[in-house]
């Protein structure tokens, strides 16, 4: 059994730009070791937006040394970056962006969603890159819902959308730089399930819709995050109401983590270089 290290409540809501009312579910500032190779998880919404003709979101900003993974549950986003990529991310889609050596991008509500208004619910996960891949060429992958395999849970308890890693013979479409699991789990009201994870990998569960009983021990509610031990392989989940969970587990990279804002590197010198390179315009331009 992977045992519960602790459960923490979501942080207070704060605005990222003018589009994303975000709660921090965990961050490497206090979970660098237990959640390695994951760096942080922000949960935006669910929040209701009125129709508008103006743009809501975050303007051009850089990243280096990491991957950003955006999972949209409700609403629709638009993305554009210095590698020339752009597009919409709709509900149930995932965007997996490798910043690697450096990328700058903007993240907004899509024009369509802004015009109609509605509920926005999404997460953004930051995945660390090992030192040997921190200077990787930037890469952008729009994973549409239809590419994500769905594994049914035994006894009709719900299903797992396998975004990364493998579950019950279903392999997620994300091409990761180190081995990891990212599962979007839906558990039906009154159901219980057991899942198996690799021995030696840390793991964490974000409860997005709950409550959910984990390992017959902890009742977790909306926006709570549960850190599990590296030791052991099994967990159990039980829900009274229909529940949505995001499960993360990965092989630890086990290297120094030095971060500053949108950059996460291995040394302070590399952070200073990232700041200089961005100020000198070496990340390029976002063209419209
Ligand atoms: Mn960003």
Image: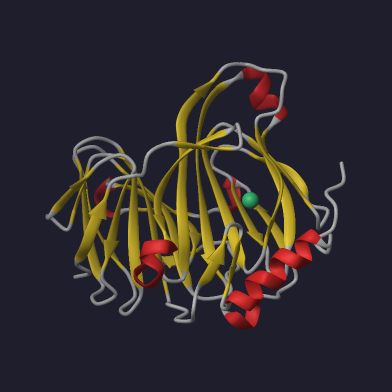
Q: Report the quarter where the N terminus lies.
A: bottom left
Q: Does residue 277 lie above or below 152 as drawn?
A: below
Asked which quadrant contains residue 154, the reply is bottom left
Q: Residue at x 42, y 62 (%)?
A: 29
Q: Report the quarter where the C terminus lies.
A: top right
Q: Residue at x 20, y 63 (%)?
A: 4
Asked which quadrant contains residue 7, the reply is bottom left
Q: Does residue 148 lie above or below 265 as drawn?
A: above
Residue 118 position, x and y percent, is: 54, 21
Q: How many marks?
A: 0
Residue 183 position, x and y percent, is: 42, 56
Residue 276 position, x and y percent, is: 75, 66
Toward the left, the furthest residue is 217
The answer to whether 44 appears left or right of 106 in the picture is: left
Residue 152 position, x and y percent, is: 37, 52
Q: Does residue 25 lie above or below 44 as drawn?
A: below
Q: Residue at x 58, y 57 (%)?
A: 261
State the scheme by which the image is colored. secondary structure
Q: Nearer the viewer, residue 89 or 172?
A: 89
The answer to whether 39 appears left or right of 10 in the picture is: right
Q: Residue at x 41, y 69 (%)?
A: 32
């Amino acid at each position: 059994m992977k045992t519960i290290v602790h459960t923490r409540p979501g942080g207070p809501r704060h605005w990222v730009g003018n589009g994303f009312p975000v709660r921090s579910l965990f961050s490497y500032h206090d979970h660098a070791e237990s959640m390695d190779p994951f760096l942080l998880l922000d949960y935006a919404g669910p929040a209701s937006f009125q129709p508008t003709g103006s743009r809501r979101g975050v303007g051009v900003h850089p990243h280096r040394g990491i991957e950003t993974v955006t999972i949209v549950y409700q609403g629709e986003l638009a993305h554009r970056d210095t590698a020339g990529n752009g597009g919409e991310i709709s509900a149930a889609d995932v965007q997996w962006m490798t910043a690697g050596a450096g990328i700058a991008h903007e993240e907004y509500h899509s024009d369509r969603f802004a015009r109609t208004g509605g509920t926005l619910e999404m997460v953004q996960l930051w995945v660390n890159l090992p030192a040997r891949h921190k200077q990787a060429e930037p890469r952008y992958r729009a994973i549409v819902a239809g590419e994500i395999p769905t594994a049914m849970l035994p006894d009709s308890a719900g299903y797992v959308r396998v975004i990364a890693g493998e579950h019950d013979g279903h392999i997620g479409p994300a091409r990761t730089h180190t081995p990891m699991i990212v599962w979007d789990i839906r558990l039906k009201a009154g159901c219980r399930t057991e899942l198996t994870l690799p021995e030696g990998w840390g793991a964490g569960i974000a409860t997005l819709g709950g409550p959910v009983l984990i390992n017959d021990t902890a009742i977790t509610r909306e926006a709570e995050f549960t850190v599990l031990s590296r030791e052991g392989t099994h967990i159990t989940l039980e829900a009274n109401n229909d529940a949505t969970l995001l499960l993360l587990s990965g092989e630890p990279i086990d290297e120094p983590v030095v971060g500053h804002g949108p950059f996460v590197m291995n040394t302070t010198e590399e952070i200073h270089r990232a700041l200089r390179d961005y100020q000198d315009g070496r990340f390029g331009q976002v063209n419209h």
